[in-house]
Amino acid sequence: MTLVIVLKRIGMAFVTVCLATVMTFILLRLTPGNAIDGWARDYATQFGITLEEAYRRIAAMINYNPNEPLHEQFIRYISGLLQGNLGVSMVYQQITVNSIIANAMPWTIFVATISLLISFVIGMLLGVRMAWKRNSILEPSVSLFTVITSAIPDFIFAILLLVVFAYGLDWFPVNGAYDPFVTPGFNIDFIVSVLYYAAMPILTFVITNIGGWALMMKGNAVSILGEDYIIAAKARGISDSVIMNRYVMKNAMLPMITMLAVTFGGMLGGATLIENIFQYPGIGYFLGEATRTRDYTVMQGIMLFLSVTMIVANLIADLVYSKLDPRIKVEG
């Protein structure tokens, strides 16, 4: 891949980030209602001042005034972004959006990464096996499982797991990221506690993603099984396990690299309902809370951060994919 092509793709990613910034800013401003109205009423009652004065003080405190002209709000927002400042929460006063993301994002990345790796590996193995043995009971079973998991929203599975394993059997905790009685750090007790508390969110993501990966892998593997080099390998007497693992699986998984990055970004953004159900302190939980309380600055910061994360992930996957598969011809 030439430097010009790399720079071109980076430039396209930068333009996409700019468009995402503008769209996020405008769409949130078009949402009816805001956190300042209720906050101003409580503030006026608490300090015995007029509603107008309370509104003015709060707007100055959080550096946001919904009555200000839109272009002035945008200029102030962009100037803050250029300084790495995503703003201050309207609800959690004096807590910056940067700190909320910094504290919450590791938990979401932890759950999303483990879930994605488990579902991807299992789905890949199932898909290859389905393509290799198309007359077995595995194919209709996985297809039925995929239809069911695709038709039912992921938060329904989260509720079912919570009701059965947390409230019913009392096997897992109902909320939190780790036991409050363990000492956070790189020690076995804390690591085990983190895995234990993340088990149900991870299981929810795995259940809802395995089927899609399996069917995608099956489709890629079926097309590869008809290639000349597969037929030649069979004619040379190479064992089925070697053909399936080294020839079919290796080549069938390459087109899934880009989808892997897209899915990862989607899991980060789609974790809102699941993390809220399990009260897991990830980025989705705080996005859900910000949406409920109309905390514009937190909503705006998190949505922009997730958008940039997905764009960067797609860019990296695009560049890496071209290196992994030498059959791809890079055009200007």
Image (spheres, helix red, strand yellow):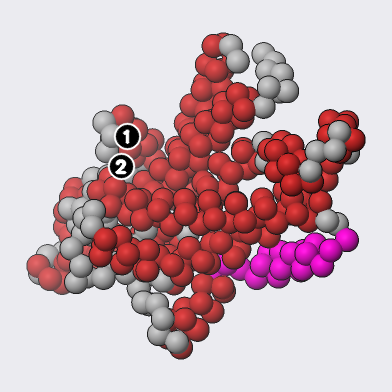
Label 1 to label 2: alpha-carbon separation: 6 Å
Q: Dividing the picture into quarters, in which one does residue 210 lie?
A: bottom right
Q: Residue furthest front?
A: 237
- The residue at which mark 1 appears reads as 81
**In the drawing, what numbered circle is on residue 129?**
none
Residue 141 appears anywhere in the view: yes
Q: Quadrant of the N terminus?
A: top right
Judge the density around disc 2: few (<14), some (14-19), many (≥20) Cα neighbours within 10 Å.
many
Residue 272 higher or lower than 235, as above or below: below
Amino acid type, mark 1: Leu
Instruction: Give SS at disc 1.
Output: helix
Q: Dividing the picture into quarters, in which one does residue 238 lie?
A: top right
Q: From which residue to which does the magenta span run?
A: 135-155
Residue visible at 84% across and 41% down in the picture: 225
- Circles 1 and 2: CB distance less than 8 Å? yes
- The residue at which mark 2 appears reads as 86
Q: Position of residue 310 (x, y in %)?
A: 50, 41
Instruction: Give SS at disc 2.
Output: loop
| The one of 58 and 110 positioned closer to us in this rendering | 110
Indicate whether residue 147 is drawn in magenta.
yes
Mark 1 vs 2, N-terminal side: 1
Residue visible at 83% across and 56% down in the picture: 133
